[in-house]
Image (spheres, coloured by chain):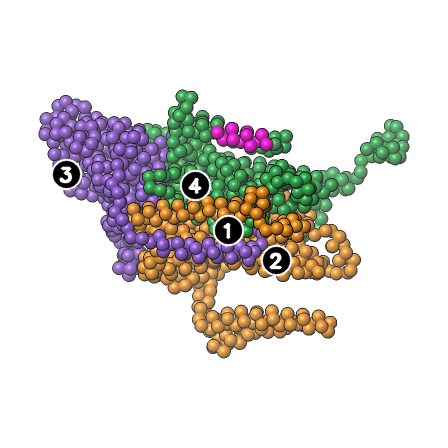
Amino acid sequence: MSDMTANAPVVPAGTPSRRPPITVVGPVAWAKASLFSSWWSTAVTLALIYLLARWIVGFVDWAFLNAIWSVPVTNGQAQTQACRALNGAGACWAVITEKHRFILFGTYPYEEHWRPLVCIFLFIGLYVVSAMRRFWRKELALIWAATLFIIGLLMWGGVFGLTYVPQERWGGLVITLILATFGIAFAFPLAVLVALGRRSKMPAIKMLCVVYVELIRGVPLISLLFMASVMFPLFLPEGMNIDKLLRAQVAIILFAAAYLAEVIRGGLQALSRGQYEAADALGLSYWQRTLFIILPQALRLVIPPLVNTFIGMFKDTSLVLIIGIFDLLTAGKTAIVEPAWQGFGIEVYVFVGVIYFIFCFAMSRYSQGLERDLNQHRVR
Amino acid sequence: MKPLRLATLRALGAVAIATAAALPAMAQQAAPAPAADTLGAIRARGTLICGVNTGLAGFAQPNSQGAWQGFDVEYCRAIAVAIFNDPDKVRYVPLTAQNRFTALQSGEVDMAARNTTVTLSRDTSLGFDFPAINFYDGQGFMVKASLGISSAKELNGATICVQPGTTTEQNLTDWARAANIQFTPVVIERVEEVVGAYAAGRCDAYTTDVSGLAATRSAQPNPAEHQILPDVISKEPLGPFVRQGDPRFADIVRWTHNAMLAAEELGITSANVDEALGADARPEAQRLLGKNGGLGQMLGLDNAWAANIIKKVGNYGEIFQRHLAPIGIQRGPNAQWTNGGLQFSPPFR
Amino acid sequence: MSDMASDPRFLRAPPKRGMRLSWADERFRAIIWQVLIVGVVVGIVWWLVGNTRHNLEVRRIATGFGFLSREAGLPIAEHLIPYTPASTYARALLVGVLNTLKVAVIGIVLATVLGTLIGIARLSKNWLLSRIAATYIEVIRDLPLLLQLLFWYTAMQMLPGPRQALHPVEGVFLSNRGLRLPWIQWEDAHSFALLGLVAGAVVSVFYARNARAKQMQDGQPRKVWPVAVGLVIGLPLVIWAAWGAPFQGDIPALRGFNFQGGLTVSPEYFALLIGLVTYTAGFIAEIVRAGIQAVPQGQWEASEALGLPRGRIMRLIVLPQALRVIVPPMTSQYLNLTKNSSLAVAIGYQDIVSIANTTLNQTGQAIEGIAIIMAVYLTISLSISLFMNWYNARIALVER
């Protein structure tokens, strides 16, 4: 900056600095360059503006101007005639007013809803802490373990005067967060082992890992969930049985691990050979080399794709709908089973969609920013 | 996507062959199931685990507070009262049409009250017992009244909405073949979706149990626009079911149902049961309420079990009135035998 | 891609003496580890299989694939091969596989087209277009596909009934019963003409290759297109004419409950296809954008300096280079689309998952049903991988 002022021509004091003509900078010039640069571009812009305006007016009418926010309740029965009279011209947000606690918390005991609510905030806190680079250390694993432990404690209860709540009663948003987060937390160590195994010199181990990864990645998650739901009980010895939620969780962990393993393998491959050579030259053993030299660097490299995998997992947990677990989407759909509320699916989908979007959008923004930062560092 | 190498393919092939080889090995002759003590397990655990529908208006659905309620749910509560004298000592496990059978087979639930049709193959090869039939149903059709048809025979060429994997689907094809009717099926798994599809006009007709049709019809914005055709194409006796090989627990389920029926027949309700306990001199009422006869002990329960069920849950007529009447289901074949229905309790003696 | 293990620089000099039976010997350790781990895995599998066998016996669940030849009795709305409820389970499952392929193949083509268009729109100089494309990509990728499918299916049902069907062009009807298009009455002549078309295309490809090879030898460019047009268009026409040139229009018309005649696209298929295509296009757009941006600006400038027109620069210079970046991630999107088509079960399109699911519910044979689903998807996934690997290898050869 100082160089530039030094070289700038001397301007007599008192002369007002002249702004460049409005046709070169400023909003008009910008509009000309990026909206109306040619007849083709102009046509596209005008058409898009028209469509956008129509859509926005329609949406505002539906979502706000014509919407109904609550309906009277007599004898415990909601009177939804007003909503039905709208006939689709406006949204019936009353269904959300009435059912939002069911959608968010499912069949969790009504008086205890503060517990899943605290858990949701703990999850969000955990994501925020993990996103901050100053926490990217070994202690992060401890933070995760501690938080997940507290969440388990809060959800189950049975100690410190909290009443015990069995897993069948858990539901709503917290199930989505649990399935995704525990899925990643347990899949991660497994994925590291599988990724290392796939690059191992030992043929039998390499083969096992390859088969595992390709087998899982070759089939849809839905078939694994069916397996967890219908077949898994047959695998266990008689009398021993695992809760439905836990079975779905195991399926999600196995599924996530295969995808994570490929992401981590990408990081291992991206490391320069010098790192391996240097470690070998120091006479480090395989585990020393892997734990202290290779993994810390490789894992740092793969954080953006790791976040993307997590977003994918987060969205994919919605598939448990098909095996009857009350996650966010299932709870939303079950909320409109009650005869009075049948037919207000769009409102519920919008509500549920907004929740999914907030989480995924925040994470994807974060991962994009991170990718840019890390790439800048590498380009230099 | 990392390119698949030949090694991978070879490995996958090996796994496929191994799986194919392992499957016939699993095909072994069946051995008799060992006796189990479900009642003991429930007592030791302190709660009954009851499988219910994932959401079917009137039969089982969570309310806005997340508490399960419905006709089937009352059966879970009644059995919890019979065992623990507490209707809330139940854990509900929502079951889909797919996993209801494995869930019970594997012991994930103690019993299922999930509107399931009693059939011979379910009773035998799937390894269940159906101790009671708590709802007699039949499959019918609902159409828009504006179509102006009066019999299912006129449905030739129609599009029909149906849920897959149930007896409903098979009945429909059997009936269409017998009646020589061509139709286009729309097969949707979840009940909300299939009802939505019908209501939106995706199908000309919706077929399911008549009770379900009545419930769907009453939930429509204008029920008069829909018409349930008089043809009933199948018998659908629905009932709670338990694992085969535990007659004691099956007896408890059977007699819980019978107790609720007998109470209705004798006019004993949750409102007057206390009074009846003191004043009712009819011998059958006295045996039912546990004042003499010691019937409860024969089942391995407290003698006051039936009185407790009536007090805390209600008799059959009451729970029907509470959950099914509001959605427009008539007693019909589920009336007491004294009123020309099929519901009939063997004597308490 | 190259493995450490296969790189000679990382292999230690082979020990001169034979393997010692001691923990200090690396090779000995490796063998022990492998035996141990494989042993544990085999042990777990053995235990699971043992349990399963026991459970199947105790619960008297029938096993084996005998049910495949039994009568299915399940109604299927859309089938590419003849099917009635009296057909066997095997045939029902085959119908399901074909339905899965039908949605996957068409979905892949449409998603590629839409995704490429959006990817290019994202790079447009028009700010509004670029922003809308970016918003589309972001929103579509941040919502679960299942939610989107349910949304599309609900939207599809809001269309008017058959009697009030939207009727933009003569013979085309859009209603909540799906899309009806005019079609021709299919006869043998059409099948043979279709075969002729395929044969003509194959021969054209070989002719083009041959011409290219000859051009390499003598430098003489040969015109390929007249021959290709003759083979691809002329041959089917000749065949069709030889069979008497039958042409009978099949125009949909409202009769009874619904439209009769014409070509039908059911709402279930339509909703699934739209959902899959719009969702996957969001991902493909990003891949295409990254691929085009990965080609250095210098390539454009150098080609312009050579005097090549813009279209040829794109076709001959930029696209081949972009493709090398695009193809591997595209493969995984194609695989994802195929696997995601299994969500059809939620909106009532009868794909393999839906039919296998019904089958396992009716027969009670869960293991066989799920094994079939997995085998089908593994086969499809491997085929797509193999094809894309072959294609990838081909375009990679451009590098000399």
In percent of the image, x 16 and y 23: which residue is there? B275
Q: CB under 8 Å between callouts 3 and 4? A: no
Q: Colour of chain C?
A: orange
User: The residue under label 3 is which amino acid type?
Assistant: Pro
Residue A271 % position (x, y): 65, 44
Q: Colour of chain A?
A: green
List the residue tagged with mark 2. C392
List the residue tagged with mark 3. B346
User: The residue under label 4 is which amino acid type?
Assistant: Ala
The mark closer to the camera, 1 or 3, is 1
- Tell me the number on the disc at residue A211: 1
A345 magenta-colored: no
The mark closer to the camera, 2 or 1, is 1
Label 1 to label 3, Cα distance in Å?
A: 60 Å
The residues colored magenta run A138-149
| C398 sits left or right of B211 in the view | right
| B81 sits left or right of A200 in the view | left
Query: Is B137 drawn above or below residue B64 in the view shown?
Result: below
User: The residue under label 2 is which amino acid type?
Assistant: Asn
List the residue tagged with mark 4. A248
| A118 sits left or right of B154 in the view | right
